[in-house]
Image (spheres, rainbow, N blue to C red):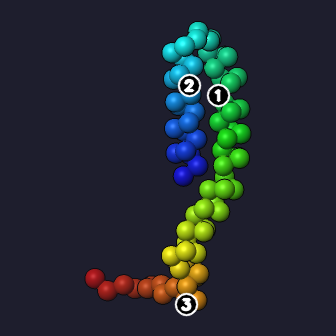
Amino acid sequence: LVVVIVGHIVLGAFMGVEATSTLSTWQHIAIWVPLTILMAIVLLQPVKGAVIGLQWAFYMHGFGGEEDLIESHPEA
């Protein structure tokens, strides 16, 4: 999810900057690579918390008080 969120933000910003200015390739790399890495690191914890909160709200994957039943040999 983090990759999708960061990708949409960075791609939109990149296209906007590309349309309005004339930066060289190395300038784009110097701007967008660190920004992409920083955004991914910053968003990782909140997105993980949101996913775990959603699992808790829907009683999924051990949050329901019952053991998850795993079928080792499901019948066809």
Q: Dividing the picture into quarters, in which one does residue 45 lie?
A: bottom right
Q: Earlier in the sequence, mark 3 or mark 2?
A: 2
Mark 1 lies on a secondary structure that is helix
Q: CA distance from mark 3 to mark 1?
A: 46 Å
The residue type indicated by label 3 comes to Glu
Answer above or below: position of 48 versus 71. Answer: above
Locate residue 6, reporting x and y percent.
58, 41
Label 3: how many Cα within 10 Å (few below 14, some 14–19, many 20+): few
Answer above or below: position of 43 versus 28. Answer: below
Residue marked by disc 3? 66
Mark 3 lies on a secondary structure that is loop
Residue depicted at x 53% and y 22%: 16
Mark 2 lies on a secondary structure that is helix
Residue marked by disc 1? 32
Most foreground residue, 72 or 1: 1
Horizontal side, residue 58 vs residue 29: left or right: left
Horizontal side, residue 68 vs residue 43: left or right: left
Q: Earlier in the sequence, mark 1 or mark 2?
A: 2
**Mark 1 and 2 residues: CB-CB less than 8 Å, in contact?**
yes
Q: Earlier in the sequence, mark 3 or mark 1?
A: 1
Q: CA distance from mark 3 to mark 2?
A: 47 Å
The residue type indicated by label 1 comes to Trp
The residue type indicated by label 2 comes to Phe
Residue marked by disc 2? 14
Residue depicted at x 58% and y 49%: 2
Residue ranking furthest to the bottom:
66
Q: Dividing the picture into quarters, in which one does residue 57 lie?
A: bottom right
Q: Dividing the picture into quarters, in which one does residue 32 lie?
A: top right
